[in-house]
Image (cartoon, helix red, strand yellow):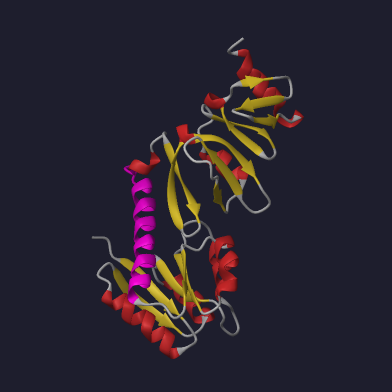
Amino acid sequence: MNVLQCIAVDDEPLALGLVCAFINKTPFLNLAGKYSSAVEALEAIHELSVDLIFLDIQMPDLTGIELARIIEKSGNQGPRIIFTTAFNQFALDGFRVDALDYLLKPFNYEEFLKAATKGKAYVELVQRAANGSAPEMKEDYLFLKVEYQLVRIAYDDILYIEGLKDYVKVILKSDTKPVLSLTSLKSLEEKLPSVKFMRVHRSFIVNLDKIGAVTRNTIQIGTVTIPVSDQYKENFSQFLSKWM
């Protein structure tokens, strides 16, 4: 069993003690440090090998959100964050800094364990991918972060993807309800295999296998008409030329 190195950060002693007790109670977690301020935690992160941070949001000097942004800017290899807070209005901010989960105080051990298990699954996924042995890296599906969990979506189930202001909307063949994920269309474009998917507009990526009809400027997928913008028309025309 992989043991995750964790730190707890909270300026409230009782809350910090509870999180530490929960960490110590969990077999796959190891408490590497506890800190009453985000500034202290930031110094420790540079010195310790940390997989997971249980992080309060409202703290003096440096808030949990601010600390998360600093970690995010340092690169993709930094520790993952689970926020612990008494204020649910910070949920969207938590999404934007790519937090793994969001525990609303007061939370019990069952809720804590559920969040910690997500952290364990995520870290193991990254480790397997780094070792080249992750089954999740097969070319027939990808993982998307939906709310505070990773959801597996088969490539063949995707009809098209629409970029919104802060989210992408994934339209599926198997579900009338689209999947919303807080990521960018550019980020998804880089993850999706180019032999199966194509960016045809600044707001749309289409599954090439799902195209039912085309005109000079549009694509038909089911009953939906998707525009092809001038910026992407040449690439799409090259794709079409293979079938004409």
**Is 141 included in the stretch rendered in magenta?**
no
Q: Quadrant of residue 217?
A: top right
Look at 65% across and 23% down and name the residue there. 236
Q: Quadrant of residue 243?
A: top right
Relative to 35, residue 226 above or below: above
Q: Is residue 240 visible?
A: yes
Look at 47% across and 82% down and name the residue there. 10
Magenta segment, principal secondary structure?
Answer: helix
The C terminus sits in image quarter: top right
In this view, which residue lies farthest toward the bottom? 13
Q: Position of residue 39 (x, y in %)?
A: 54, 80
Q: Position of residue 23 (x, y in %)?
A: 32, 75
Q: Position of residue 150 (x, y in %)?
A: 44, 53
Q: How many circles with numbers are drawn on the protein? A: 0
Relative to 172, residue 60 above or below: below
Look at 64% across and 26% down and name the residue there. 220
Look at 40% across and 67% down and name the residue there. 52
Q: Is residue 73 visible?
A: no
Q: Position of residue 91 (x, y in %)?
A: 56, 67
Q: Quadrant of residue 178?
A: top right
Query: Along the line of sight, which residue is nearer the eye, 110 or 45?
Result: 110
Q: Is residue 183 left or right of residue 7?
A: right
- Magenta region: which residues? 109-134
**Is 119 included in the stretch rendered in magenta?**
yes
